[in-house]
Image: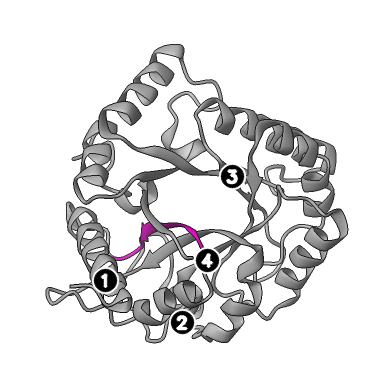
Amino acid sequence: MSNLKYGVSLYSYTGDINTVLTLEDAMAQIADIGATGIEILGEGHVPNYPEPSTAWIDQWFGLLEKYQLEPTNYGSWIDSSMWRDRDLTADEGAVMLARDLRLAHRLGFTSIRPKIGVVSMDLRPHPIWEEVIERNLDLAAELDLIICPEIHAPTPIKHPVVDEYIAFIERTGSKNFRLLIDTGIFQRAITTAKHDGLSEEAQEEGWRKPLAVPMSDLVDVLPYVSFIQAKFFDINDDLVDGQIPWREILQTLKENEWSGYLSSEYEGDRLPYRSIEQVRRQHALLHSLEAEIAGTP
């Protein structure tokens, strides 16, 4: 039986968090829409990363308890291009991932998304990825964490990157390495959302362009998927999403008895307060669709 749970990534509130929203405000918003999970970006949301103060950690757990939220996925970076004159070594990358695994565990998370630097426009990870991950599988098992790289546009599911991840799972037999699906890969129509810092050309050729990955491809990899980032760009006043086919996604997850979190990741226009309303609309839409699929009023 499928058991879908709903959460929110603090990335959704980019531009609003730490300006019009405090951490507690954001957590209150998440709880108020009926979500139970919270996802963060370590470097972006943890003060004094990677060494947060004891006071902040106490505040974090106090707010989790107050709003009845559970930590879901922790986003980390392994910056393979941090040096101008050389690439990061596998040794250095393994230390970075181990550091974030320990911090994610300390904050109560159950999975971690390692964003390793890419070497191509279709987001092939730097060749050190395999050694970096493999050297941390025992630590991930010890800390009861799942390492889940993200399948993100413009990388479709039928792609060598995904094939290599699945081959790694099969070779190692590890239960602590799985896939994270970003629903932006199912986008069917172009979005007009704009992001500061990117040229129009870069936006048109990158994240705006619909991949329209078919649901049959999702079915093929669902046994390897542990977490879903529910990427979206805009939901209108009538609770219609013109880009992401939510009914098909939820139907596919239900029919294939997938269980786990869908974590909102709003990536539309960054106007003040807009993210708050957009996340609220997405959850209303998802709950409505799930009820319709289940045949309940």
Give the alpha-carbon distance from disc 2 to disc 4, as whole Å: 28 Å
Judged from this view, the residue extending furthest toward the right is: 171
Mark sitting earlier along the chain (3/1): 3
Identify residue type, mark 3. Ile
Residue appearing at x 37%, y 84% in the figure: 190
Q: Which is nearer the eye, 26 or 217?
A: 217
Q: Please identify the quarter of the rendering in which residue 29 is found.
A: top left
Residue bearing mark 1: 291
Q: Which residues are magenta?
A: 258-268
Tell me where residue 204 appears, x and y as whole percent. Answer: 44, 80
The answer to whether marks 4 and 1 mark residues whose Cβ atoms lie closer than 8 Å is no
Q: CA distance from mark 3 to mark 1?
A: 30 Å
Q: Read off the residue under disc 4.
A: 258
At mark 1, the secondary structure is helix
How busy is the neighbourhood of tag 1: few (under 14 within 10 Å), some, or many (20 plus)? few
Q: Quadrant of residue 70?
A: top left
Label 4 secondary element:
loop
The structure residue drawn at horizontal position 36% and vertical position 58%, both measured from the top left corner, is 264
Residue at numbered disc 2: 209
Category of crowding for the residue at label 4, using alpha-carbon neighbours closer than 10 angstroms: few (below 14), some (14–19), many (at least 20): some
Which of the two discs, 3 and 2, sits closer to the camera? 3
Q: Is residue 280 visible?
A: yes
| Mark number, residue 112 | 3
Q: Are marks 2 and 1 in contact (CB under 8 Å)?
A: no
Query: Residue 265: where, in percent of width, then height?
Result: 38, 58
Whichever of callouts 4 and 3 sits on the residue coming sooner in the sequence is 3
Q: Are marks 3 and 2 in contact (CB under 8 Å)?
A: no
